Amino acid sequence: MTTTENRPGTAAPDWTTRPTPDTADAWIARAHEVAEILAVDAAERDRAAETPYAEIALLKDSGLVTLLGPAEHGGGGQEWPTAYRVVREVAAADGSIGQLLGYHYLWNWAARLVGTKEQIAAVEAEAARNRWFFGGAVNPRDADVVIRDDGDHIVYNGRKSFSTGSRVSDVTVLEGVLENTDTHVFAIVPSDQPGITFHDDWDNIGQRLTESGSVTISEVQVPWAAAAGFVDKVFQPRVYNTLNVPTIQLVFVNFYLGIARGALETAAEYTRTETRPWLHGGFDRAVDEPYQLDLYGDLASKLWAVEALADRVAEEGLAIHHDAWNVTAQQRGEHEVRVAAVKARATEVALEITTKVFEGLGARATAAALGFDRFWRNVRTHTLHDPVAYKRREVGAFLLRDELPEPTWYS
């Protein structure tokens, strides 16, 4: 971080001298430690909007990047429900870093999503041993990257508007279409290479440290053996290949909820210590005013309810992840409906909390130096990723017509 290492009591501990967490609760506690470090200068770093090299180093040093990796290769050996909780913890301190970590988990898992068993084992072992940080240049709203078949290799060429993780990533997940076909191919490639140019053009109002700018891909070669899920140039399909959407949508849910919790907890501390009671209210302390008690009680109740639903939906998805080679379309569809439901609730509660906390803070809390606006800006920016109305529609169609969502890039 920009100044954290010079502040007493905020430097990262030497995690190499401590045991690696071996339970879900221990990993969540480790994530909380990371969040406490990030929270110290979160507003300052948001304003600076610099490439988060130090923040990613913190995620690596703490071991959080290896959470889903196999324990025998130095990974955390954990499941998706724990990963979602870790994302939520980190996002409570810094929404951008929470998003980066969540996307990293998704792309780290990409080999498991579409790869062969041999590819999965090789990628996950290397990623855990080397503590790779993953980025991804996969934006379905853009024209497809074109892939040329060059015999033993395939060659990627094209441009994507968004490449979250870009310059802070060790490896990037590419996706494109073989020319003159409708065959999509995923591959994991080194980020630092001449054929990949990350453009420093991410300048949005929120999630300012996510390195989500555009990327140009030029003559990037990948051996056919590394084309995920292909054997002898033929893809081996599974229903599980379509789990990318519900999985990434649950990542979204959890960093939205993390940002909302960060806003609520930061606002509550300010209200306890800084907010002045209204001069005509008849109370000596802001925390005694009935409207403050109602406001915070209402927002906390809503947040806790959606967090509980998010945890429940994550647990429900475990059966699918545990039986990835045999999951059915019915299982996948029913899980996507539940994910759609919690995505809708998380979007609405996060937007409400990050807006309404200002009612409990008071006018002085709008000072730019305090940075309370960053919580709303972060949620507002990313919740426009895909229209929440379509998530509600998925739930309604299932309830009224017994229709399962058709697998697409967004459902």
Image (spheres, grey):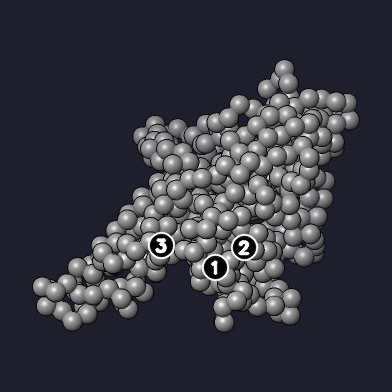
Instruction: Indicate the position of residue 359 as horizontal and vertical percent values.
Output: 25, 62
For badge 1, the amino acid type reads Leu
Distance Cα–Cα, label 3 vs label 1: 14 Å
- Can residue 263 be seen in this snapshot? no
Residue under numbered circle 2: 55
Along the horizontal axis of the image, is 27 left or right of 355?
right
Instruction: Indicate the position of residue 36 as horizontal and vertical percent values.
Output: 53, 72
Q: How many marks?
A: 3
Residue under numbered circle 1: 38
Image quadrant occupied by the N terminus: bottom right
Going from N to C along the chain, the mark reached first, 1 or 2, is 1
Residue under numbered circle 3: 371
Q: Tell me the element at label 2.
A: helix
Q: Is residue 234 above or below residue 174?
A: above
Distance Cα–Cα, label 1 vs label 2: 8 Å
Residue at the (80%, 64%) spot, across then down = 72
- Can residue 171 be seen in this snapshot? yes
Q: Mark 2 packing: few (<14 Cα in 10 Å), some, or many (20+)?
A: some
